Image (tube, coloured by chain):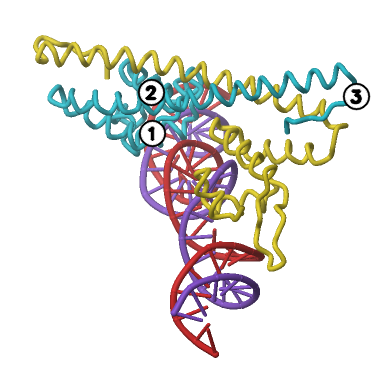
Chain colours: A cyan, B yellow, C purple, D red
Amino acid sequence: MKIAEVSEQHGISTDTLRYYERIGLIPPVNRSESGIRDYNELDIRRVEFVKCMRSAGLPVEVLIDYIALVQQGDQTIAARKDILVEQRELLISRMEQMQKTLDILNHKIEVYEKAVLKNEKDMILVVE
Amino acid sequence: MKIAEVSEQHGISTDTLRYYERIGLIPPVNRSESGIRDYNELDIRRVEFVKCMRSAGLPVEVLIDYIALVQQGDQTIAARKDILVEQRELLISRMEQMQKTLDILNHKIEVYEKAVLKNEKDMILVVE
DNA sequence: CCTTGACTTGGAGTCGACTCCAGGTGTTAC
DNA sequence: GTAACACCTGGAGTCGACTCCAAGTCAAGG
């Protein structure tokens, strides 16, 4: 599969795909004789993995370390797990913080709705 | 309250506090005669609000627009609500995406744990 | 053969959000 | 009255993560 197809099917620009490979976020993809990338199933799973992790805010640098460990084989399993566990904790706290923010947004929107219903009469808006 | 106190109590650098004010994310704070900022209760509530929204990933630009509307008074209530509703939807989808990532992390960690228990014997790790 | 179009590279540019700095001012402590 | 310190400003620098670009290569179609 060529880079343009991967790009289209997974919603990642070709620039980003090449960038990820360049910085080691994705191991080198096989090439045709003329040097053109040909993504196989495994490559695509890796791309999806990175896309998923990035979309949740895991830093590129951490993922590079993780991928490097994966390339080094089974003796790095403990280290890999440690990375994932740490990132999981960070992810959970980000989500908790977002939940708090969501609660506040919900509250504010509710207050605004009441204000609109009452035609803004007599409202002293505590929210901002 | 002086800027250093606000900074310490709310975990925001003085640079960031001044920056927020400069770009209009926080309305101008009152000054002493010699020009030193003196944050009142309302200012601090605003700082907390911005901190909360930013921590959930709401863009600075959107917050600037929102705060500008707040300054313009009650006739902007509908517009303000629209902004919050839109940002709420975006926030919810980010959280959903993060939940998916969390599920995958949990799964991978579990697989790694099993691998460690079995002392890595006979494991063909499908995870990466 | 030559154009078209998708691919390649290395390097530079952009963007959002801070973060730092130099140079200046005001207040307090000795 | 002067040193130390917290504050001020405008502007420049940094950082993470892309994104764009120029210049070049190759395969296929007319």
Estimate the spatial distance between the alpha carbons at disc 1 and disc 2, rounded to whole Å: 9 Å
- Circles 1 and 2: CB distance less than 8 Å? yes
Mark 3 is surrounded, within 10 Å at the Cα level, by few (under 14), some (14 to 19) or many (20 or more) other residues, namely few
Marks 1, 3 in one chain: yes
Vertical placement of residue D18 versus A107, above or below: below
Q: Which residue is at 15% across, 16% downward?
A: B116
The numbered mark at residue A47 is: 2
Residue B104 location (% of width, % of height) = 36, 14
Work out whether mark 1 precedes mark 2 in sequence or the reverse, and give the earlier one: 1
Say which residue label 1 marks: A20
> How much space separates mark 1 and mark 3, taking CA atoms?
55 Å
Assign a secondary structure to mark 3: loop
Q: Which mark is residue B21?
A: none
Q: Nearer the viewer, mark 3 or mark 2?
A: 3
Residue D9: x and y, percent?
66, 65
Nearer to us: label 1 or label 3: 3
Residue bearing the label numbered 3 = A121
Of the residues shown, which amino acid type is indicated by label 1? Tyr
